[in-house]
Amino acid sequence: YDVKIASGTSVRYIAWSDEITLKTVDASVLKVRGVEGAAAPIYLIADQADQNIDVWRINAADGGVLTFDSRASGNSDSDLVAQMTITPHATVASSSVTFPGILDVNGTADFDVTDFDIASSGDIDLVSTNDAAAAIYLRENAGTSGTIKIHADQGTSVTEGAESINILSDAGGVGIRSTANLANAVNLTVDGGTTSTMTLFNDQGTAAT
């Protein structure tokens, strides 16, 4: 609020300060309120902002979206780029968190979700450095109708070692096994047309065990 100072007929107004600079703030509750229709930002400025990257902003936008912004270049708010965005929803399960860059998790990640979608315009690599059996394990355990499907939509290569779906073991064997006591427990099918073929190669193996 403005401060009004009156002495008789003499009146003076002192406008409210829009900036206060302090070295330390110790508060049990800190509230940052944006004016009507505006965001409520908190700025974190390291090293006297000697470099652009020293400036961070935690920004609660009008409408509820929360962003963690950094400044890679320039010297104004328009140069701040969202490094993480949290979009809330009345149904918490429909809320979202977006990382536009690289998410590096050093430890254990436990996802207990209804659906888990990974969409990438680049490569998707699953790598384990655990020297143990089942170091990478894909498992379906929902019920009798559950399946696991590997599907290449558009790849056309049939070149040996570079097929559109390629299973390769450099030092060990490749096993396809079913313990189901059912007809067609293991089923290999080619169904592309009248000229399609199926070939099994064992180029150098001599063991009969």
Image (cartoon, rainbow, N blue to C red):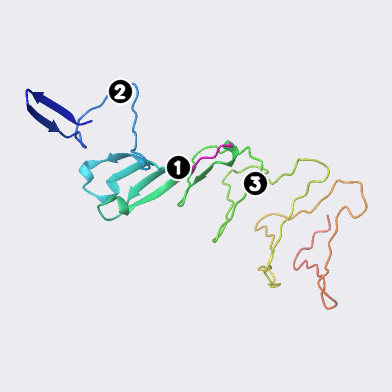
As measured in the structure, the alpha-carbon distance from the residue carrying label 3 to the one carrying label 1 is 42 Å
Say which residue appears at 59% left-offset and 37% top-offset: 91
Say which residue appears at 33% left-offset and 27% top-offset: 30
Task: Please name the amino acid that badge 1 sits on.
Answer: Gly
Q: Nearer the viewer, mark 3 or mark 2?
A: 2
Which element is circle 3 on?
loop
Task: Please name the amino acid that badge 2 sits on.
Answer: Ala
Q: Earlier in the sequence, mark 2 or mark 1?
A: 2
Task: Please name the amino acid that badge 3 sits on.
Answer: Ile
Q: Magenta segment range?
A: 85-91
Farthest residue, direction top = 28
Q: Position of residue 198 (x, y in %)?
A: 82, 70
Q: Quadrant of residue 55?
A: top left
Which element is circle 1 on?
loop
- The residue indicated by pointer 1 is 63
- The residue indicated by pointer 3 is 136
Q: Position of residue 197 (x, y in %)?
A: 82, 73
| Quarter of the C terminus within the rendering | bottom right
Q: Position of residue 73 (x, y in %)?
A: 29, 55
Q: Residue 27, labelled with which disc? A: 2
